[in-house]
Amino acid sequence: MLDRLVEQRWPVTAVLSVPSITKKADRTLDLTADQWKLAQETAEVLGLLITLTELLSQEENVSLSATMQMLFNLKRRHLSPKEDDSPVIREVKKTLVTEIDSRWKLSLLEPSSIYLLSSALDQRFKHLKFLTNEKKDLVYIEVVRLAELLHQRQTVREVEGEPATSDREEETVVPPPKKKKQQDMLMQSESDDEEEHEHDETAQRKRWRNI
């Protein structure tokens, strides 16, 4: 709505200023310059949420593994206050960040979270750049634990003479995602254009990367 209003600013202003069309008492309906600027800035901030919603809704995208990357990216890169932000826009950004944290509970995500595990298994986000090094290690350890558990179960089935994978499991296996270049800002990590910072890897992380 705001996008459309800003786009049609001058036609709206022209109509409101024509005596034969707009009554004198209604000419005050036109927004001030500051109000028009605020409408444009608000539309730009909210437009990022539209982009996020569209990306998560596209059937051709693997959205589960991209969810955390986009949410953290949205908060850190696009909803962080800037020096030239007006007080109102700062408050809008602050409210949006609060709502995202409240609804998604990003700070309380456990290493066993399906969102984090799926990100670790996605080629695009497996480095988990949106997490701290300590949290990354915990997620990798959980992935390795689940992989070992799956291997043990398959071994038991083979020993007992059962197929390694049941028919039902074969039906629910998700094919690897098609290689698609993600150009949207929300899909890019903060350090995509910089040299990746080296980190002392624990034995568990080395083991994970060799899988």
Image (cartoon, rainbow, N blue to C red):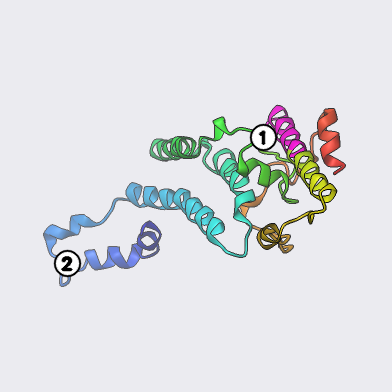
- Is 197 or 70 nearer to us in this picture? 70
Q: Which residue sits at x=68%, y=30%? A: 135
Q: x and y percent of residue 168 in the render?
A: 66, 59
- Is 77 or 82 nearer to us in this picture? 77
| Amino acid type, mark 1 | Leu
Do residues under tags 1 and 2 come within 8 Å of each other at their CB atoms? no
- Say if the magenta span includes residue 117: no
Q: x and y percent of residue 165 in the render?
A: 75, 55
Image check: 26 left or right of 180? left
Q: Which residue sits at x=73%, y=46%? A: 192
- Residue furthest out toward the front: 160
Secondary structure of the residue carrying numbered label 1: loop
Q: Is residue 2 above or below residue 103?
A: below
Image check: 58 left or right of 120? left
| Residue 99 image-quadrant placement | top left
| Amino acid type, mark 2 | Thr
Magenta part of the protein: which range? 132-145
| Residue 73 image-quadrant placement | top right
Q: x and y percent of residue 134 in the render?
A: 71, 27
Quadrant, the N terminus? bottom left
| Residue 28 image-quadrant placement | bottom left
Q: x and y percent of residue 58 in the render?
A: 56, 62
- Residue furthest out toward the bottom: 20
Secondary structure of the residue carrying numbered label 2: loop
Q: Which residue is mark 2?
A: 22
User: Is residue 61 among the parts visible in the rendering?
Assistant: yes
Choose mark 1 or mark 2, whichever is in front: 1
Res. 131 mark: 1
- Say if the magenta span includes residue 139: yes
Which comes sooner in the sequence, label 1 or label 2? Answer: 2
Image check: 91 left or right of 195? left
